[in-house]
Amino acid sequence: QVQLVEYGGGFVQAGDSLRLSCAASGRTSSSLAMYWFRQAPGQARELIVSMDSSGGRTYYADSVKGRFTISRDNAKNTVYLQIDRLKPEDTAVYYCAAGNEYGESYDYWGRGTQVTVSS
């Protein structure tokens, strides 16, 4: 069983940067495809960023392209989401997820971390 815990959320100002972390345990994150979702108030959860287990394939939603960057440190079993030039519309709960097959399933989920961006 894989456990995922997100860190790094908070209250920030528009234009600031933030780095979210997702620490995995129970299995090495290097064997898993990793995903970041977010859910804004009153909206559906949306996939914003993903990376396959090798790190060779990534996906960025149009809404975050150019400002969000996913990376992983396999030695720390951690995946990161760097968020630059934050906007108020980035306000959401950010969730980390992991899957055994890239693009096919989201098998494990974290509980989420809140990011609030003030204008």
Image (tube, helix red, strand yellow):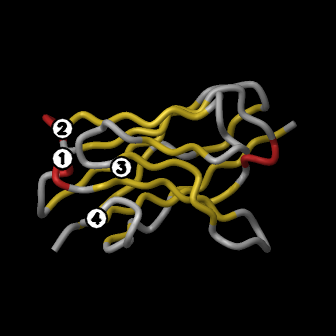
Check disc 2 and give the amino acid type: Asn
Disc marking residue 74? 2
Precedes in sequence: disc 3 or disc 4: 3
Instruction: Identify which residue is drawn at 51% across, 45% down.
Output: 59
Query: Picture coordinates of residue 67 (x, y %)?
Result: 64, 30
Query: Picture coordinates of residue 19 (x, y %)?
Result: 49, 34
The answer to whether 114 is drawn above or below residue 76 in the figure is: below
Regarding mark 4 in the picture, which secondary structure is present there? loop
Instruction: Identify which residue is drawn at 24% across, 34% down.
Output: 73
- Give the number of the mark in front: 4 or 1: 4
Q: Which residue is mark 4?
A: 101
Placement of the N terminus among the 4 image quadrants: bottom left
Left or right, 5 with respect to 65, comes to left
Measure how far apart labels 1 and 2 are at the Cα level: 6 Å
- Give the number of the mark in front: 1 or 3: 1
Check disc 4 and give the amino acid type: Glu
- Give the number of the mark in front: 4 or 2: 4
Q: Nearer the viewer, residue 35 or 93?
A: 35
Measure how far apart labels 4 and 2 are at the Cα level: 18 Å
Q: Are marks 1 and 3 in contact (CB under 8 Å)?
A: no
Q: Which residue is mark 1?
A: 30
Q: Nearer the viewer, residue 80 or 105?
A: 105
